[in-house]
Amino acid sequence: MSSATDGRDLTARATIRNAALRLFAHRGHDTVTVREIAAAAGVSPALVLHHFGSKDGLRAAVDAHAAESLDTIFAELGGEELAGMLARGEATTSVAESFVQVFPPGSPLPAYLRRLLLTNDPAGAALFARWYATTRGVLEAMVENGIAAPTGDPAVRAAFLLVNDLAVILLREQITTAIGDDPLTPAGLTRWTKDVTAVYTGGAFADPGKEPPP
Amino acid sequence: MSSATDGRDLTARATIRNAALRLFAHRGHDTVTVREIAAAAGVSPALVLHHFGSKDGLRAAVDAHAAESLDTIFAELGGEELAGMLARGEATTSVAESFVQVFPPGSPLPAYLRRLLLTNDPAGAALFARWYATTRGVLEAMVENGIAAPTGDPAVRAAFLLVNDLAVILLREQITTAIGDDPLTPAGLTRWTKDVTAVYTGGAFADPGKEPPP
DNA sequence: CCTTGCGCTGAACACGTGTTTAGTATTTTG
DNA sequence: CAAAATACTAAACACGTGTTCAGCGCAAGG
């Protein structure tokens, strides 16, 4: 019915859904009003309810649509081709890298992902659970291939790496003002990845039995 | 006027502020109503406005109070004693560790920090800016003392480490269901820290010129 | 004493919200 | 072509919201 990236689907229903996605992403579900969504979509407020039943129905539809789009990122990362890529050293990218490659610059999906993960609704929880399972699988494969170092606590390691990656999306704006580059643009991403890769491959601290920094 | 942990301050004004903090933290500023706050504090709705002028005034007061409490964590981490601790190898703890040590188990402050960082209001931005400056300073000192490895991009490295730490608070619930332990409890924290320290000191991946995992 | 100020309340007000209803174009269908 | 379903709208409704207002009880101070 609708592709992941939603090429040109100018039916009113899709227009409303897209407008709601953008508004929800940037301002939150509760502060956005049905009248605002209707105005942004160029339709009457009543039509919004006519198509989605209620505001909650619209929210559910937007959640489902966003989750579907976001899952395409992990679909290819967790696919069959992955093992081969790992073996060849082509390596999989991070979630942030996938975002830059897959979605256009002004896409509201990063911001919407933020909202999905923060408001602990089922949609966000399910998304995280799927991605976590994928991450664990990939890490296990990498350990078997000798690309990743084994660990005594694979659950924590997978969560740590996934969560670090998501932090780039969750704190995108703060990172941008801190380092002067948006990490979700090609320029900022390469700069970010360079230093992150250094830490992930060689570490950052001396081992004298002591801890990470503040 | 009020200590970080706010011992026993049973004036009605403080009671209202604490009730609002707890409700705001768990449900968001917009979904919580003045009448709910009043009920939770055991007062009339009108008294809330009498003390804080408006709901936005209350929100500002709660923001200021929370920021003050949260800053105590970084105050000691960035203090003068830090350099000595670093030299002695006692090392500073992470933000998550400080949370566990400083705040009681049921404290709403982690959840409120989440809200502060997500809604891009000035309060959250200022908080992040201060913490980022502290992190950069600490890292610089650690590099000078040979505890941390130097990097060509200190801005990115500091942001990376700070953001990873904050991710534990932002995604606390998802991490809890993923690994089966709340990382903001002593038990979960030690488990978390163990593997994280391993990555930060020795890395997790082979260096063949390739990237982090998904 | 009383009277001034303060903490505090119940009831009301103005307004924006999600939603409904009745009705009109427009397209689809038999 | 006629009829039924669908896309869509304007106007209104019921309700919850933040906020205001007039007044109560009570301690402080002259």
Image (cartoon, coloured by chain):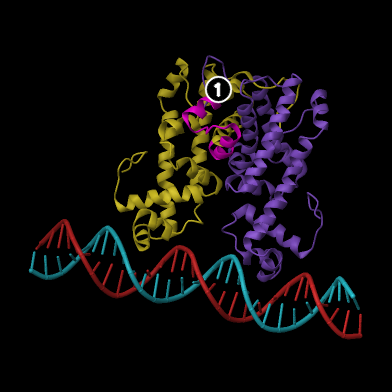
Chain colours: A purple, B yellow, C cyan, D red
Quadrant of residue A194 within the rendered picture: top right
Instruction: Please indicate whether residue B115 sits to the left or right of residue A93 in the image.
Output: left
Q: Quadrant of residue C9?
A: bottom left
Q: Residue at x 55, y 39 (%)?
A: B173
Q: Position of residue B89 (x, y in %)?
A: 47, 16
Displayed quadrant of residue C25: bottom right
> Can residue A34 be found in the magenta stretch?
no
Chain of the residue where label 1 is placed in the rendered structure: B
Q: Amino acid at mark 1?
A: Lys
In this rendering, position of residue B103 left or right of residue A126:
left
Query: Does the magenta portion include B185?
Result: yes
Residue B119 in view? yes
At 68% across and 19% down in the image, what residue appears? Answer: A149
Asked whether residue A188 is in view, the answer is no
Seen in the image, is B161 located left or right of residue D25?
A: right
> Is residue A170 placed above or below B156 in the rendered structure?
below
Q: Would you call the spot at circle 1 few (<14 residues within 10 Å), some (14-19), or many (20 or more)?
A: some
| Identity of the residue drawn at 43% across and 33% down | B73
Q: Main secondary structure of the magenta part?
A: helix
Q: Quadrant of the N terminus of chain A?
A: bottom right
| Residue B23 coordinates in the image, percent (x, y) | 45, 50
Q: Nearer the viewer, residue A11 or B200?
A: A11
Of helix, strand and loop, which one carries label 1?
A: helix
Would you place residue B190 above or below residue B159 in this image? above
- Nearer-the-camera pick, A183 or B6: B6
Taking A125 as reference, is C2 above or below it?
A: below
The vertical placement of B16 against A198, above or below, is: below
Question: The magenta stretch spans which residues?
Answer: B169-193
Left or right position of B40 against A173: left
Residue B47 lies, in percent from the top left, at 34, 60
Q: Which residue is mark 1?
A: B194
- The x and y percentages for residue A165 are 65, 35
